Amino acid sequence: MDILISGIQLGAIYAILSIGFSLILGSARIIFLTYAVFYMLVGYFWYIVNTLFGMNLILSASLAVVMTVALGIGTYKLCVERIRQHETTVILITLVLAFFFEECVLLGFGSQLRNVPAFIPGYVELLGVKVLNQYSLTLAVSLVLIFLIWLFLWKTKLGIAIRATSQDREVVNLMGINEKRMSMIAVGVGIALAGIAGVMVAPIYLLEPTMWTEPFIMVLAIVILGGLGSIKGSIIGAYILGYAQVALVYLVPMGSFIRSSVALAAMIVVLLIRPEGMFGVLFEEERL
Amino acid sequence: MAYFLWRLYKNFEGEILAIPGKTVAFFGILFLFCLYFIPIHPYVLRILTFSAIFAIYAASWDLLYFAGQLNLGHGAFFGVAGYVAAILDLQLHLPSGVAIILGAIGSVICGLILGIPALRMRGPYLAILTLAFPVILTGVVFALPDITGGELGLSGISSLSESDLSVYYICLVVMLLSVLIMLKLADTRSSIVRTGIVFKAMAEDEIAARTSGINTPRYKLLAFAVSAFFAGISGGLYVYVIKVAGPSTFHPLFSIHPVIWTIFGGAASIYGPVAGVFILYPFWGGLFAATPELRMIIFNALIIIIILFMPEGISHWFRDRTERMCPRCKLINSRRRSSCRACSAAL
């Protein structure tokens, strides 16, 4: 039961994170490795606004998300967009940016753990297991978010334009869609998702500057496992790897040491059987 | 005798002094060899020793990148070789050279295993898949604490040599040899070694390469094996220099370092990463000594700025500014010349 609850919660967080990442990867066509850092930064923004300025919880959380998105788009515009055609350079610069932000936080706050209060404190008893209300909230928010993202991508004009951009950049340009702006919007939406995931998680885990590395690797694994750019694949992959991790921690002694290893080994096995991931379509060869 | 020396000088002038890139490389290497005559602080010497080791590491990453395989888990090779060398040294007391070579062979096996998924995957899939390997190996290290020493790693490894200076020279010579071999393997114009042109073809267009009758799976595995071998050599040297083999080499960051050095120095050129390491690593060491708290921020900010202005890497940037190819005979000339030095065609 513990496994079930924790798995659902972890899977929900991973799902939000990987949808955002695969959105960026799909439509902006960049491997935006700074992504997971925003998940950590939002917690610190929230901490600043809430604890230091004493603003109310929900308001400060939304403010933190907005600040993160602004920062994210700023970084994208300033540092990534102008070198977008050099693929490996993008990988490098986004990684270096990630470490840069981590160091900034480390310098500003030190490495001690911080915590922020939960939205809804307390817990409910469910079949003999204490379920923190924050867990239920996370789950609810993630479901709503997934629904909203689906609505956005499939029913609005902007969403359709973003999906079109992920399919063929050149034709999109010919159709009068501003392909650069679409990429920027995709990055913004993706970072907003990371921000919301970070806000959901911050009260459960403690804030520390290195909290982004583990979800970061897991998100990469999930996105690859589910198939690049496939949102359905991301959700299912998130739950598979989330459950695999949680089950290992609970069932195997020393499980917490090897949880990432086993989850990643599972990913490799799936990829050996189906190289394009579970629901992915191989990107067609880029036109020259 | 005088005539011979004069010929030697003329050759030197024509081959090296005429091309600015080669001149810089030559005098850089000459300077690295002259450290024996210069009284030098032990900290600087240690930094340069590590630079030499990491130059092999970065160049081996670049060889794989040259063959079109983006590997974000290069630390796996480095670390496996280090552990193998450390275990051989501690348990069997093998001489250091043998232990390092055997460690590199262990790393080749690891490379062949990593190469198998690479046969089916490309681009971002492969990059992220390889990122997973060091993490998995960390799990293995933690799961077998009796052999690998668990979280603390293995310590008490014997030394390469008595004095720090000779350790430095060993690393420098090994570095030069490895880099020369890798340069030859990645030489697209060589008529003896075919790997250069094949790797390049594979990187440019794999399907076209296969259509032209190249056995791409075999060459991919070869690229992984060679790259793993040299990464293994550097991993072995590293373990002998710091005298500890720990799981820190499997940290994702450690696999990212060669990527930073290589792209900073100039990717897919083999000499680029060497230049990158010898610029960035001493710089980082200097920052570490000057401002320990701010060093990472300054370092990262500088890398970001430099990349924004030279996305191709520093060695390509330098080459574009100082060298120019003759349109008729394809000979490389200095940018200051107005006509080609061999065929006198206007540049």
Image (cartoon, coloured by chain):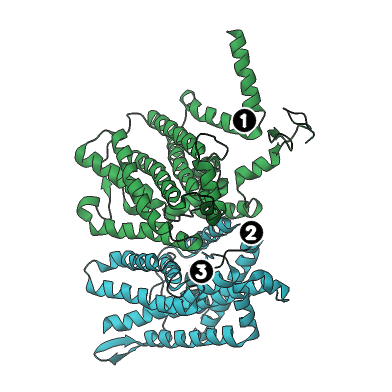
Chain colours: A cyan, B green
Whether residue A212 sits left or right of residue A122 in the image: it is right
Quarter occupied by residue B347? top right
In front of the other: label 1 or label 3? 3
Q: Residue furthest top?
A: B1
- Label ID, residue B23: 1
Total marks shown come to: 3
Kind of element beneath mark 1: helix
- Please provide percent x and percent y for residue A116: 43, 78
The chain identifier of the residue carrying mark 1 reads B
Look at the numbered discs 2 and 1 and tell me whether their residues touch, using CB distance below 8 Å: no
Quarter occupied by residue B172? top left
Image quarter where the N terminus of chain A lies is bottom left
Q: Residues within 10 Å of mark 2 (few under 14, many from 20)?
A: some
- Please provide percent x and percent y for residue B77: 37, 49
**Nearest to N terminus: mark 2 or mark 3:** 2
Q: Residues within 10 Å of mark 1 (few under 14, many from 20)?
A: some
Between residues A60 and B145, which one lies in front from this camera angle? B145
Q: Which residue is the site of mark 3? A: A282
Kind of element beneath mark 3: loop
Write the residue at 37% across / 43% down: B232
Q: Residues within 10 Å of mark 3 (few under 14, many from 20)?
A: some
Q: Which residue is the site of mark 2? A: A83
Would you place residue B49 above or below residue B146 in this image?
above
The chain identifier of the residue carrying mark 3 reads A
- Please provide percent x and percent y for residue A31: 53, 64
Write the residue at 37% across / 84% down: A135
- Label ID, residue B39: none
Q: Kindly identify the amino acid type of the residue bearing the numbered disc 3.
A: Leu
